[in-house]
Image: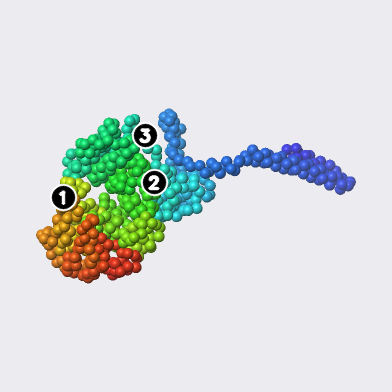
Amino acid sequence: MSLAAYCVICCRRMGTSTPPPKSSTYWRDIRNIIKFTGSLILGGSLFITYEVLALKKSLTLDTQVVEREKMKSYIYVHTVSLDKTENHGITYQARKELHKAVRKVLATSARILRGPFSDTFSTVDIEDHDCTVWLLLRKSRSDDRAARLQAVQEMSEAHHWHDYQYRIIAQACDMRTLTGLARSKESDLRFFLRPPPLPSLKEDSSTEEELRHLLASLPQTDLDECIQCFTALALSESSQSLAAQKGGLWCFGGNGLPYAESFGEVPSATVEMFCLEALVKHSEIPTHCDKIEANGGLQLLQRLYQLHKDCPKVQRDIMRILGNMALNEHLHSTIVRSGWVSILAEAIKSQHIMEASHAARTLANLDRETVPDKYQDGVYVLHPQYRTSQPIKADVLFIHGLMGAAFKTWRQQDNDQDLTEKVSEDETKYTTCWPKSWLARDCPALRIISVEYDTSLSDWRARCPTERKSIAFRSNELLRKLRAAGVGDRPVIWVSHSMGGLLVKKMLLEASKKPEMSTIINNTRGIIFYSVPHHGSHLAEYSVNIRYLLFPSLEVKELSKDSPALKTLQDDFLEFAKDKNFQVLSFVETLPTYIGSMIKLHVVPLESADLGLGDLIPVDVNHLNICKPKKKDAFLYQRTLQFIRDALAKDLEN
């Protein structure tokens, strides 16, 4: 203001005064204005500079503190005021309506301009290097399925993030994304939070007692005879165990035997096995799964899983129960919240085929985003166990025989080396499951499934004494499970060993009689038989040690050469296979097999393994090793691989 006044006075003085005699007066006034203006500008600049430096000093932060804060893990939740008056006033309602209007305007303009805010509008104050994390999280919740799958894939491929960025995903992602990450091969385990703390056991209680209470809480009426048998046995044994713990005795059949305290864990683990086997049977019933969940079964099973990390049998039964519960979609959220996905994500990466396959089955049942099929108890996918972009063009099914299993039947042939030395990452030297290791690499476009079912040589050793399952019963049971897994929707190759081949024949005959199973027949391309006793076996005619002498199981009886059911099955299937023009390849052993420690027996002779259709190839091995190649370039495997490729040649090309 003073500068302006001075300028005005000078101008008036110049305008009203008479022309100066000399021009020096004019330049003197100009110099005075410049001096005053310069001083003012200089002083103002110094003042502004001082204020800026002072403000900067007052706002300077310790960068190390900032970095430490950024590394922390946070859980982001929507806060709601506890003051009810805030949610009902005129001001609140006006603000709410105003926010709605603003969001609508922004969303509409974004759609018109095709901007980046086409989703629900939101603002986030984040660093540039965190944008990728939050954009992937938003993308994983998209209404577009392809976008969701792409987001999960990009998350799983991220290996350069900081630890806190993985934790952000773990805390903020939804159930669908978490399951997808668990089924992604390259996912970092930091995506998965630790399971929540387990509830404390009741005073003067134990896991064994809690397990017994859980089993006793399930319905005990209108059950299958075998389920009733398992349940009664488990409750009986657990009662005796508890009495022994309190009274110092462990009872077998009513006879008290003294046990030292140091041996207490052995009976307890045995009783837990009985209870878990009963729970496996109960978990096959959907309503019983609801009871297990409601009574804290998921937490109790998790406690047992952690306590028995060195007991594969206990962990296997726990995984079977969990996999059965995962068949019920309304239980998925509860399973995820209980922390099981974190455990499964680690288990599926295990080098042990059994642990990885059980985890893969449960996760596949949880993953409704990419897996339309459901894998019931005893049906295991060996390949692909993870999500994959590789299109699956055909199925190869492996069915084991008497006393076999889904994994051990199909291992590489054993030699004199210690098996513990063979289990390594180098599966080219030795593999515990050649369909998963070798066949999956040679034919990646195949879905490889292995089936497991219980069998016994004698009723003395039957897992369920009331169980009398014929080949016809088992074939219908397996057929139903395989159809639920989507078998029949694409071309199929059946691979079977011993009695498994009889089951395959019976399944195909039964499927031909049911219209809903017709796709299985139409898509069957070929069958491989490894020493299948089409005309019976000598096994039923011999005693296998003294404990197998009496009461041979129904499975063994049906393998007799004079079995009418076996002859009818052979005649019906041979005619059916010729009519459908199935491609068939058969192998047969030429060496005898030791059954027990004393009996040496040629289980399936050449004439019994001859179906009467396709090639029959004798191999110089015994009955147990006929389906176990010595190495990858062995004739047994290479001929099997050639048959599969030839039978599926047209399907794999498309």
- Distance between the Cα atoms at labels 1 and 3? 42 Å
For numbered disc 1, what is the local secondary structure?
A: loop
The residue positioned 39% from the left and 52% from the top of the image is 349
**Residue 28 falls left or right of residue 574:** right
Which numbered dot is residue 440?
none
Front tag of 1 and 3? 1
Question: Coloring scheme of the render?
Answer: rainbow
Q: Which residue is mark 3?
A: 200
Give the residue displayed 85% in from the left and 43% down from the top: 18
Q: Secondary structure at mark 3?
A: loop
Tag 3: amino acid: Ser
Residue occupied by mark 2: 342
Image marks 2 and 3: residues in contact by CB distance under 8 Å: no
Mark 2 or 1, which is nearer the eye? 1
Residue under circle 1? 468
User: Badge 2: few (under 14), some or many (20 or more) residues near its Cα, within 10 Å?
Assistant: many
